[in-house]
């Protein structure tokens, strides 16, 4: 067996990829912009070139056992990315085959949040756990559900889209998936920015956020303001955490996980988000489940969870 695999994490904004050894060490990594490529062939061209350069500069061009990919709406069974809401391409994209044709090694793909769950279970805070849910908070809200030590794929490969459970059944926000009121529309980084705009437009109380052009506000701006004690910004986190906690209560009732693990940019908000989530869970949880599920932050830094998880797939790719 060759000594390395490649893990690729395709996000709505960036694609991060790395060379990984059998012990889970990321030997080298790099990234390209996902969002700028409206043509998937152009994207594959840039990704292939960048990955070739990384492999050559690390003397690994002929030492790759396989490639694993985590991507939104990626189907483990078919090897295709199917109508991804947060990527700039439509239809059914045979991504595994496209990469296999370029690199002539086995390629396996799965949902980006499933890849993060595999990484967390193998190398992170979920080591040794057989039942947990990974929630990725980035451009969207993704999830990977592990039960009895196995990822839940469902009969079609698409199980575990918890970001698209309905949390606001009446007059909910439009979601990128085409439905309204989804968890993702409220609790992703973009959802937090939308909440900020709504609060600023419908209220008159002072806030540091009013110093920023309203369309330019990001979740990071909300975090920065909240850290400085901005009351409105802290309320935005309270609002977001309450919605998330209620949704988590439903997830706990479904699979009774040992833990819910949060990963991604928004999870770095720490207690500003974790405290209202935990308070919401405590208020709304069914008594049979009270105090049984831990709320944890990922132990893996930045994009490592998804890259490592994707790479773990590559050892088994055929």
Image (cartoon, grey):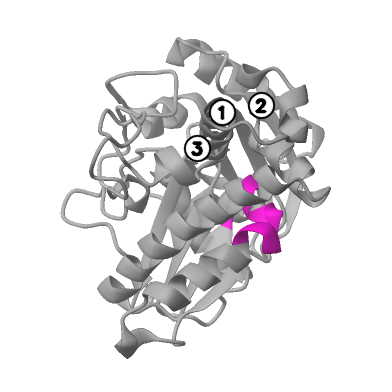
- Disc 1 crowd, CA 10 A, few/some/many (<14, 14-19, 20+): some
The mark closer to the camera, 1 or 3, is: 1
Q: Position of residue 122 (x, y in %)?
A: 56, 69
Q: Nearer the viewer, residue 142 or 9?
A: 142
Q: Position of residue 75 (x, y in %)?
A: 30, 42
Q: Nearer the viewer, residue 266 or 130?
A: 266
Instruction: Identify the residue under disc 2.
Output: 217
Per the model, the C-alpha gap separating discs 3 and 2 is 11 Å
Instruction: Identify the residue under disc 3.
Output: 191
Magenta-colored stretch includes residue 225: no
Q: Position of residue 78 (x, y in %)?
A: 25, 40
At 61% across and 56% down in the image, what residue appears?
305
> Does the CB distance between marks 2 and 1 fall below 8 Å?
yes
Per the model, the C-alpha gap separating discs 2 and 1 is 8 Å
> Does the CB distance between marks 3 and 2 fall below 8 Å?
no
Position of residue 131 relative to residue 34, above or below, is below
Q: Residue furthest front?
A: 204
Taking the image as shown, residue 131 lies to the left or right of residue 220, namely left
Q: Main secondary structure of the magenta part?
A: helix
- Disc 3 crowd, CA 10 A, few/some/many (<14, 14-19, 20+): many
| Magenta-highlighted residues | 263-273
Sequence-wise, the earlier of marks 3 and 2 is 3
Describe the element under mark 2 as helix, strand or loop: loop
Describe the element under mark 1 as helix, strand or loop: helix
User: Residue 270's quadrant in the figure?
Assistant: bottom right
The mark closer to the camera, 2 or 1, is: 1
Sequence-wise, the earlier of marks 2 and 1 is 1
Instruction: Identify the residue under disc 1.
Output: 197
At 27% across and 48% down in the image, what residue appears?
166
């Amino acid at each position: 067996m060759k000594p390395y695999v490649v893990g690729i994490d395709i996000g709505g904004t960036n694609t991060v990829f790395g060379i990984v050894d059998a012990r889970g060490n990321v030997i080298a990594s790099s990234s390209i912009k996902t969002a700028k490529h409206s043509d998937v062939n152009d994207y594959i061209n840039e990704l292939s070139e960048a990955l070739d350069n990384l492999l050559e500069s690390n003397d690994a061009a002929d030492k790759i056992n396989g490639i694993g990919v985590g991507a939104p709406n990626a189907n483990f069974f078919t090897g295709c990315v199917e109508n991804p809401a947060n990527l700039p391409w439509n239809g059914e994209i045979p991504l595994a085959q496209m990469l296999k044709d370029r690199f002539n090694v086995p390629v396996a793909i799965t949902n980006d949040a499933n890849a993060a769950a595999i990484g967390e279970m193998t190398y992170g805070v979920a080591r040794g756990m057989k039942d947990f849910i990974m929630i990725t908070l980035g451009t969207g809200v993704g999830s990977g559900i592990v039960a009895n030590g196995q990822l839940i794929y469902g009969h079609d490969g698409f199980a575990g889209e918890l970001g698209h459970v309905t949390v606001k059944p009446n007059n909910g926000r439009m979601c990128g998936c085409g439905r309204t009121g989804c968890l993702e529309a409220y609790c992703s980084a973009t959802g937090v920015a939308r909440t900020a705009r709504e609060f600023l437009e419908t209220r008159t109380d002072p806030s540091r956020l009013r110093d920023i052009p309203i369309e330019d506000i990001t979740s990071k701006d909300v975090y920065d303001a909240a850290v400085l004690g901005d009351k409105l910004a802290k309320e935005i986190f309270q609002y977001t955490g309450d919605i998330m906690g209620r949704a988590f209560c439903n997830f706990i009732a479904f699979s009774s996980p040992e833990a819910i693990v949060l990963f991604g940019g928004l999870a770095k908000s720490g207690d500003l988000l974790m405290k209202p989530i935990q308070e919401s869970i405590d208020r709304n949880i069914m008594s049979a489940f009270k105090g049984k599920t831990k709320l944890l932050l990922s132990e893996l830094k930045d994009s490592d969870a998804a890259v490592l998880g994707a790479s773990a797939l590559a050892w088994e790719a055929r």
